[in-house]
Amino acid sequence: MDCYEYLAAVLEKTGFTASKKASKRAGVKYSMRPLCKCGLKPAAVNYRKNGRTYYRTRCERCNYQGQDAAGVPAWQRKGYKKKNHCEKCGFASSHSEQFDVYHIDGDLRNCRFRNLKTVCANCQRILQKTGVKWRQGDLTPDF
């Protein structure tokens, strides 16, 4: 008995299997829930039919937030980097945690660089509270 067969036998007693490759080598049916693309959580259940469970490719968190990588915002995946100053009031700091990325049109999926501005936490809250659109700077439409 090689290590793959032993591992498959031990895990089969507990109701799990090691991996697809190890399971195929040992001749055991793969029954473990697949991981999300983010690699952190198990994939969400899509539906069950005839006693078989079908899974989605992403976990509940990635499905809800629309993220391909957990915790990485879409604007960061597109290549936008936070600046070290607020583009609204001019506040400057060496700590990037004091700044947020503000979407001018309010659509979090629109990650064009023209739509993104770096603002301090104070300006972010003021913009959310007053509902005022971006009025400063060189805002041009994208059509």
Image (tube, rainbow, N blue to C red):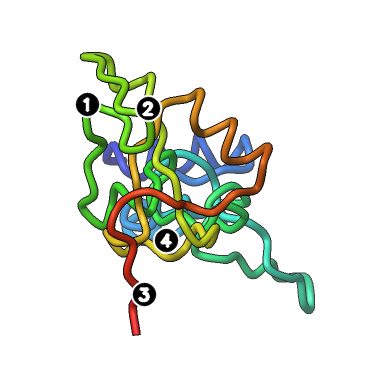
x then y, percent, for residue 51: 78, 70
Identify the residue under disc 2: 99
The alpha-carbon separation of the residues under discs 1 and 2 comes to 8 Å
Identify the residue under disc 3: 141
Give the secondary structure at mark 4. loop
Identify the residue under disc 1: 84
Instruction: State if disc 2 and disc 1 touch (CB < 8 Å).
Output: yes
Give the mark toward the camera: 4 or 1: 1
Q: Could you tell which of marks 1 and 3 lies nearer the N-terminus?
A: 1
Amino acid type at circle 2 is: Phe
Give the mark toward the camera: 4 or 2: 2
The alpha-carbon separation of the residues under discs 4 and 1 comes to 57 Å
The alpha-carbon separation of the residues under discs 4 and 2 comes to 54 Å
- Tell me what residue is drawn at x 79 percent, y 78 percent: 50
Q: Residue furthest bottom?
A: 143
The alpha-carbon separation of the residues under discs 1 and 3 comes to 25 Å
Q: Nearer the viewer, residue 43 or 109?
A: 109
Is residue 30 something one can see in this rendering? no
Amino acid type at circle 1 is: Asn
Q: Could you tell which of marks 1 and 2 lies nearer the N-terminus?
A: 1
Q: Nearer the viewer, residue 39 or 65?
A: 65
